[in-house]
Amino acid sequence: MSDPNQSIDYGSLMHKAMRGLIYEVLTDISANGLPGAHHFFVTFDTMHPDVEIADWLSDRYPGEMTIVVQHQYESLTVTDQGFGITLSFGDSPEPLYVPYNAIKTFVDPSVEFGLRFETDDDDDDMDAPEAPMDVMAEPEDTPKKDADVVSLDQFRK
């Protein structure tokens, strides 16, 4: 007999499925490259204990950082826990490692697709103004599209 005080944690299950989707997409990109106009904006928590970035980047982006995976990237490695990538900041290549559970948003504006990972802390910040995202290495002539973001709020009690 099941415990009547327990419930199915749909939020955690959705996060696991969404991280699995990112894993599948990045695994394909690692093997075959980016198809067509696809590119990604990945926002992640720079203070997550398993994130690996240069000290000057974590100093410049305390809290969160958005990277663009588009034209200038190298060494994309994908594991079941996260991904490693080398991006160019100015003319300087920098390796990064981002675990999936540090990702806050994953957006492919070319097809208006996006995922947002909600945390309990997000509930506390509902009335706070949204901070602008730092976007790097995006060409100025790239047309901007709003992406549909999947929110887990509808599944919460």
Image: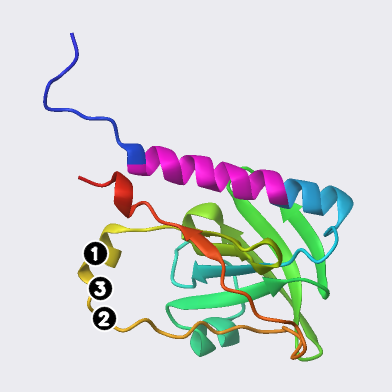
Within 10 Å of disc 2 (Cα), the crowding (few <14, some 14-19, many 20+) is few
Report the span colored magenta: 11-25
Residue 45 in the image: above or below residue 103: below
Q: Which mark is residue 128?
A: 2
Do residues under tags 1 and 3 come within 8 Å of each other at their CB atoms? yes
* Amino acid under disc 3: Asp
Residue 67 location, x and y as percent? 63, 74
Residue 139 location, x and y as percent? 76, 86
Q: Evaluate whether residue 39 shows in this view.
A: yes
- Residue 17 in the magenta stretch? The answer is yes
Task: Give the residue at x 41% y 37%.
Answer: 13
On the rendered structure, is 146 left or right of 47? Answer: right
Nearer to the camera, 63 or 135: 135
State the residue position of label 3: 125
Residue lying at the far top in this picture: please name it: 1
Q: Which mark is residue 6?
A: none
Which image quarter is the C terminus in?
top left
State the residue position of label 1: 123
* Amino acid under disc 1: Asp
Q: Quadrant of residue 48?
A: bottom left
Task: Give the residue at x 73% y 65%.
Answer: 85
Q: Secondary structure at mark 1?
A: helix
Whole-number angstrom distance, CA of label 2 to CA of label 1:
10 Å
Nearer to the camera, 112 or 95: 112
- Residue 122 in the magenta stretch? The answer is no
Task: Give the residue at x 75% y 54%.
Answer: 77
